Image (cartoon, helix red, strand yellow):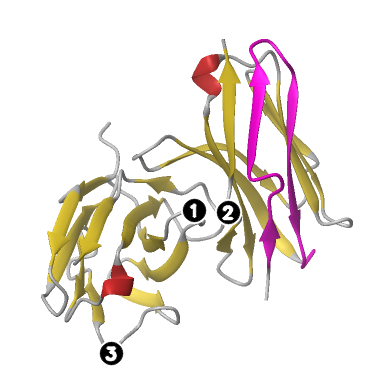
Amino acid sequence: EAGVVQSPRYKIIEKKQPVAFWCNPISGHNTLYWYRQNLGQGPELLIRYENEEAVDDSQLPKDRFSAERLKGVDSTLKIQPAELGDSAVYLCASSLYGGGETQYFGPGTRLLVL
Amino acid sequence: KQEVTQIPAALSVPEGENLVLNCSFTDSAIYNLQWFRQDPGKGLTSLLLIQSSQREQTSGRLNASLDKSSGRSTLYIAASQPGDSATYLCAVGSGANSKLTFGKGITLSVRP
């Protein structure tokens, strides 16, 4: 069974440019998470979806970040415009349901903003 | 606000040694606790999940314990191998949706 798929794996952009990340969760998993991991830190939750509904986006910087999971399957996270401080690894994870079950992580997208 | 601490930040041991990685958290009202492994440039791999009602979980050479009252968890690795070299992260699930709060991780190096 395929794991969580993310693309691209690496992205280098100049500040003020837009960027988008894509995630396809494990088949059948209802809950999808986007995390940001800064160097030397643990991941921090940006947004959590239950099917197509964003049920926790309290940590998402809504002035420049947006996300969608239109059909309750794959998801896209967008940054517009990107800032230098957005350089990080963006991780997607999924779980069968959101009730404290094991989360399965993708390989992440490494973003460098110049 | 839940805070998770993992000390030390890095650890180097010779192959074959049994070792313990520590994790502490500030709010004992947790739903569960997970230990993850992260290899350089990779995502996280779940190792063990302990529900709040459990005291420990075992998988192969790994054993994780949970003491909610003292706000601590330990990950025990038996007979360490060079392939165990990675960063180990502890994550505490708390709140209605079991939101995970991660520690910064412990980078383990097992010398041949």
Q: Is residue A18 magenta?
A: no
Q: Disc 1 or disc 2, which is closer to the eye?
A: 1
Residue type highlighted by circle 1: Gly
- The Cα atoms of the two marked residues, 1 and 2, are separated by 6 Å
- The Cα atoms of the two marked residues, 2 and 3, are separated by 27 Å
Identify the residue at image location x=54%, y=60%. A99
Residue type highlighted by circle 2: Lys
Q: Disc 3 or disc 1, which is closer to the eye?
A: 1
Q: Are marks 1 and 2 on the same chain?
A: no
Q: Look at the image and give the residue range highlighted in magenta.
A: B3-28
The quadrant of the image that shows the C terminus of chain A is bottom left
- For label 1, the residue is A40
Q: Position of residue A63 (x, y in %)?
A: 28, 89
Q: Position of residue A103 (x, y in %)?
A: 46, 49
Identify the residue at image location x=45%, y=56%. A97
- For label 2, the residue is B104
- For label 3, the residue is A63
